[in-house]
Amino acid sequence: MDFLGDGFRRALALLLSGDRDVYGIALLTFKVAVVATAVACAAGIPTGFLLATRPFWGRRAALTVVNTALAFPTVVVGLLLYGLLSRRGPLGGLGWLYTWQAIVIGDVLLAFPIAAALSAAAVQGVDPRIRRTAETLGAGPWRAAWTVAREARFALAAVITAAFGQTVAEVGAAMIVGGNIRGATRTLTTAVALYTAQGDFGLALALGVVLLLLALLVNVALQVLQGRGGSRG
Amino acid sequence: MVELRAVQHRYEGRVVLDLERFTVTPGAAVAIVGPNGSGKSTLLRLLALLERPSEGEVLVDGRAAWSGRQRGRPAPGLRRRVTLVEQRPILLRGTVRENLEYGLKLRGMRRPEVNRTVATVGERLGITPLLGRRRHELSDGEVQRVAVARALGLEPDLLLLDEPVSSADRAAAQTLYRALEEERRRRPLAICLASHQLEDAYRWADDVRALAEGRLSPVTPENLFRVELPLEGASGLKHVRVGTVLIATVTDRTGPAILAVPPTDIFVSREPLPSSARNVFTGRVTRLSRPRPGAVHVTADVGVELVAVVTEEATRDLALAPGSPVAFAFKASAVRVF
């Protein structure tokens, strides 16, 4: 148990001393997670709306695919992406392997199904009369969708939180396509894995605490935003 | 103004509406009556251009509302001419005032005019004190009134109301009907109202149409029965069980159908009289109503509830009053089957 206590002390010291390594890793993780969450939600939430509201051929199959993709193993996504981005792969020309952009792509692939499936469920949970009411009052398709989104705002905020949770905590794909390169593609999760393997438990723990703080920060921020939007119906 | 042509609408393969033609002309006051599940709400949604019929056409001023190119969307601008208030209306998130403003802002109305319109419709429907409230602070009746105000404020050419007084008390219903009448005096507004209450419909509409099982009744809306027509029957004369009585009708049809007894074809007497009528039932008068001057609707329980229309004079001569004995007689050939 002693080493656990040592670990916490070391973690606290690192955080308070403003260790450049630790903060650099945290900043990169934050950047990757924010960009990936933004892209995944920008594509996933409208997809969820379509899946929930537009009757089209193959809709049920599409929903099944999205729901199945929720359980997609992150290392498999990393592996496939590695194949695409490696020098001999079809996207090798981009030169993105072992860059933070590659980690973003991996995270987007993993967070997109979450955003799509959860927002489809959120929209399906909205009373269908809301959309009809908006339409009969003269709203076009976009405005009607916006009105529905306002009704589902808590569920949609949860979608963003879940997508951010996925991207900030992702390790498998980040390790494979990012390469865990110090100062370039080392994220909090890959760093924790590395330092634990190296026996630097204190550093790993410090980074773990930072990861938790980051998640907490984003959740609080989202809650504050929701509160400003008014919690009453 | 709005016309349905050869419209058939299906939900999951089941036909819920089947109309050869249904027209609402500008300024008309149409009531659609029929039991629950007869297709009234579906019909209103089609008229409101909220749903595209599975088959057939919806025309607004002779223009097809759903042309092939706009996938799943009616031609722009057309929908704004028609507004629907659903049976159980819902308010959007925000205050009552914000709800009233929603459609006005969508139409690009400026702030002073928005405020004026909200004040006017608010007053007309007696909801001014509610303007600052939100949906969970309102009763069902209040929500209904707000929903009607929200629709009226948009000044549609056609206002569709689905059971508009179902959650309202008597006073609220009167306020509502008064507001609608006022609006119709002020400008040419067509109203199409669905109701399962015939009296309401008669009092209010110029044109009462009955819907049963998704089809328009060829006769007046009283005395409609859903029946199962038997196979046998000499020379087309069939006896069909309705309630506790057997009604004789002349038809070649078999299977499920709607049977209609036109109220003006019923002879009313104090006791049964010998005649050629194959249907003679006795019972007691349950209600007398006078939806229009000159015509008295006599409702009687004769084993089944039937309505007959007689003159004021006949009512006096026969001394008809609730509870008095009565005989209803009508010919088998007067019974309509569709």
Image: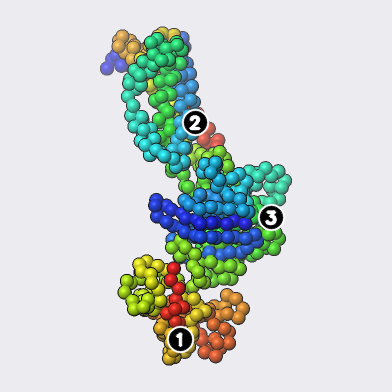
Q: Amino acid at mark 2?
A: Leu
Task: Find residue B292 and report its horizontal and vertical position in percent.
Answer: 60, 76
Q: Earlier in the sequence, mark 3 or mark 1?
A: 3
**In terms of image quadrants, where is residue B316?**
bottom right
Q: Chain of mark 2?
A: A
Q: How many other residues sit within 10 Å of disc 3, few (<14), some (14-19) or many (≥20)?
A: some
The vertical placement of B317 against A123, above or below, is: below
Residue at 45% of width from left, 35% of height from top? A48
Task: Find residue B193 and report its horizontal and vertical position in percent.
Answer: 56, 62
Q: Can residue B57 be seen? A: yes
Q: Are marks 1 and 2 in contact (CB under 8 Å)?
A: no
Same subunit: marks 2 and 3: no
The vertical placement of B285 against B73, above or below, is: below
Task: Tell me the mark number nearer the camera, choosing from 3 and 1.
Answer: 1
Q: CA distance from mark 1 to mark 2?
A: 73 Å
The residue at the far left in this view is A1
Q: Amino acid at mark 1?
A: Val
Residue at 69% of width from left, 44% of height from top? B109
Q: Chain of mark 1?
A: B
A141 or B114, nearer to the observer:
A141
**Residue under numbered circle 3:** B120
Q: Amino acid at mark 3?
A: Thr
**In terms of image quadrants, where is residue B256?**
bottom left
**Residue under numbered circle 1:** B326
Same subunit: marks 1 and 2: no
Task: Tell me the mark number nearer the camera, choosing from 2 and 3.
Answer: 3
- In the picture, which quadrant includes the C terminus of chain B? bottom left
Task: Find residue A191 and report its horizontal and vertical position in percent.
Answer: 37, 13
**Residue under numbered circle 2:** A222
